[in-house]
Image: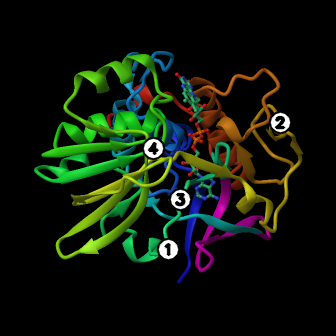
């Protein structure tokens, strides 16, 4: 039987996470649907080790720590979280909505909140003929559980902030960490590069990945100089590719429902309503002429959208009240 929710929130970035919490606070049955394996959106995917200062009450935490706090808040309620789940279609069904996840799974909802940011993230792939065979068999694009590499040999490939930060993070647990980059210079924050230079990470530059092959209980990572020749094979347990992410909203553009948009996002009313009755939008997905794509802005939009969504499917429900009237612990 298809599960029916009061509110389906599409996108598990910081704004979708808070919206899911707030919708639960309003006693809604909530689905939170995220394309990536982990909740956290851009902060976790793009800049996990950077400190964020302009989120109320969480100033100075790294993005990763901020996401942990948002998750703790979300965990006060029993929200159905769909991970690794891309909404591939959204169709109106009377006043309700049918959502298709990953092309097959169906759920239904009385209202929808779009918190899809700049689109669903896909990691930029490394080009290898045996890519599919290696994926999740020693080749990964995420280092969500750094403690899993304890005592292992890992190689991080890439030259941006996320590559440097990931190498430094994994190096806290791994027995040996390589960082492979095709240029001598890293495109990372100076502070991170300094930390890298002072760390025990074995920096392999300017070198590129020529091949990765299974070799019994480990992988053989073959590197060669960018100019060709000079190949070297390193035995490693895990290769984490950090070539960045591509955000694409083409999923949404292929949905049955279509939205009024401007070049930088969806057009919404003061209550965050899109042109489609019962569908609301918050966070970076919203057209933003003021160029204020900020977490705090989306967090403010979340209760507005949720309250409007509740009014859409249950106009007689009162509220919203104050959370300080509740006792959640
Ligand atoms: C390098 C960098 C530094 C930044 N620093 C700051 C800062 O210091 N302070 C600040 O306030 N802001 C900062 N920002 C901006 C901030 O990250 C964004 O404003 C914020 O992430 C927006 O949150 P969101 O939840 O709307 O969207 P996102 O964080 O983009 O999350 C959207 C989520 O929706 C998912 N999704 C999309 N489509 C689908 C689909 N069809 N099905 C399922 N899931 C889907 C995506 O996978 C993603 O996880 C920074 C951004 C960058 C790139």
Image point (18%, 36%), residue name: 172
- Of mark 4 and mark 3, the one earlier in the sequence is 3
Q: Is mark 3 within 8 Å of ligand 1?
A: no
Out of 95 and 112, give the one closest to the viewer.
112
In the picture, the disc for residue 269 is 2
**CB-based contact (under 8 Å), mark 1 and mark 4:** no
The residue beneath circle 1 is: 129
Residue marked by disc 4: 158
Q: Is residue 314 left or right of residue 326?
A: right
Q: CA distance from mark 1 to mark 4?
A: 19 Å
Mark 3 — residue? 125
Which badge, 3 or 2, is on the more N-terminal residue? 3
The boundaries of the magenta stretch are 92-112
Which residue occupies 24% across, 35% down?
201
Name the residue: 61% across, 36% down. 302
Labels 2 and 1 touching (C-beta < 8 A): no
């Amino acid at each position: 039987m298809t599960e029916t929710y009061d509110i389906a929130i599409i996108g598990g970035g910081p704004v979708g996470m808070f919206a899911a919490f707030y919708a639960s606070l309003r006693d809604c049955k909530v689905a939170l649907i995220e394309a990536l394996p982990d909740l956290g959106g851009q902060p976790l995917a793009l800049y996990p080790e950077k400190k964020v200062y302009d989120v109320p009450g969480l100033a100075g935490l790294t993005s990763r720590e901020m996401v942990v706090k948002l998750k703790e808040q979300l965990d006060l309620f029993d929200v159905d979280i769909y991970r690794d789940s891309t909404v591939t279609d959204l169709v109106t069904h009377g006043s309700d909505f049918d959502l298709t996840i990953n092309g097959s799974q169906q759920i239904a909802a009385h209202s929808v909140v779009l918190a899809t940011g700049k689109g669903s993230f896909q990691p930029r792939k490394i080009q290898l003929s045996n890519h599919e065979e290696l994926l999740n068999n020693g080749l990964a694009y995420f280092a969500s559980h750094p403690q899993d590499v304890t005592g292992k040999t890992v190689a991080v490939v890439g030259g941006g902030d996320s590559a440097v930060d990931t190498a430094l993070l994994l190096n806290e647990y791994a027995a040996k960490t390589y960082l492979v980059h095709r240029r001598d210079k890293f495109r990372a924050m100076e502070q991170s590069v300094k930390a890298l230079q002072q760390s025990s990470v074995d920096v392999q530059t300017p070198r590129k990945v020529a091949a990765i092959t299974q070799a019994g209980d480990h992988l053989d990572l073959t590197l060669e100089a960018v100019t060709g020749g000079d190949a070297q094979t390193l035995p490693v347990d895990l290769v984490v590719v950090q070539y960045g992410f591509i955000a694409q909203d083409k999923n949404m553009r292929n949905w049955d429902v279509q939205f009024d948009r401007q070049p930088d996002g969806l057009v919404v009313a003061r209550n965050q309503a899109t042109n489609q009755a019962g569908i609301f939008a918050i966070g970076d997905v919203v057209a933003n002429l003021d160029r204020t794509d900020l977490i705090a802005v989306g967090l403010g939009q979340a209760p507005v959208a949720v309250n409007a969504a509740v009014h859409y499917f249950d106009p007689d429900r009162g509220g919203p009240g104050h959370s300080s009237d509740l006792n959640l612990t």
